[in-house]
Amino acid sequence: MTIRRILVFPHPNLRRKANPVTEFDRSVAQLADDMLETMYESKGIGLSAVQVNLPLNLIVTDVSEEKNAPRVLVNPQLELLSGLQHHEEGCLSVPGFWEVVERADNIRVNAQSVKGKHFSFETSGLESVCIQHEVDHLSGKLFVDYLPRIKMRRIRSKLLKSSAAA
Ligand code: QAP
Ligand code: CO
């Protein structure tokens, strides 16, 4: 397993649209393993392939306290079912910033495993927020896009300054 480098906002590749995974070979399982390791090492609860500079429809999550419930979703599709929730969100690509975002509460997820097997489930609460956040990355969308422009600009400028200093 390998730790992959995570792109930081406003890196332009975070705006790329991901392509469907069509070949379910060993490299897909390898990428999912690397992304889980990268997410755990960074103390994250979710990570998308776009964030590690690969425009592929693949996300990983683990919202459990014990960090023992990894989920890998290949080609995820969401149906927003009902309810709204407000939740504070962060992002491994927007380090150090947390803001409240409004999302659907109940969702249905249709996805494939690393072997290509189709499956579906319903979820709500934090897992639902996390999956919606990660699926947004697959179309080049970030949680800062939901914030007032002035707030987003302030975050962008601070992150540009810290990456210039690094
Ligand atoms: C998305 O984000 C998420 O700034 C996943 O310094 C987050 O795992 C969905 C992280 C919260 C719902 C609620 C961010 C770690 C992790 C940081 C993450 C940081 C260290 C973000
Ligand atoms: Co994110």
Image (cartoon, rainbow, N blue to C red):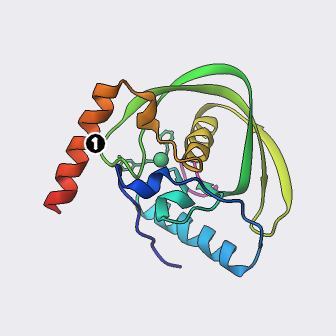
Q: Is residue 160 magenta?
A: no
Whether residue 66 is visible to the viewer of this picture, yes or no, is yes
For the record, the magenta segment spans: 61-69
Toward the left, the furthest residue is: 165
Residue at the disc numbered 1: 156
Please provide percent x and percent y for residue 25: 75, 78
Q: Is residue 81 left or right of residue 131?
A: right
Query: Residue 70, can we see it?
Result: no
65 and 142: which is toward the camera: 142
Residue at screen point 19% across, 53% down: 162
The C terminus: image quadrant: bottom left
Query: Residue at 34% of width from left, 49% of height from top?
Result: 10
44 lies left or right of 9 = right
* Secondary structure state at the residue bearing disc 1: helix
Is 66 one of the magenta-colored residues? yes
Q: Residue furthest right?
A: 118
**Secondary structure mostly taken by the magenta-highlighted segment of the chain:** loop
Mark 1 surroundings within 10 Å by alpha-carbon count, few (fewer than 14), some (14 through 19), many (20 or more): some
Q: Nearer the viewer, residue 140 or 117?
A: 140
When the figure is inspected, residue 128 is found, relative to residue 68, above or below; the finding is above
Say above or below: 25 vs 60.
Answer: below
* Percent x, y of residue 106: 71, 28
Residue at the image position 55 percent from the left and 41 percent from the top: 133
Residue 102 horizontal/vertical position (percent): 53, 24
Does 56 sit left or right of 50 as displayed?
right
Nearest the viewer among 153 and 89 is 153
Above or below 144: residue 38: below
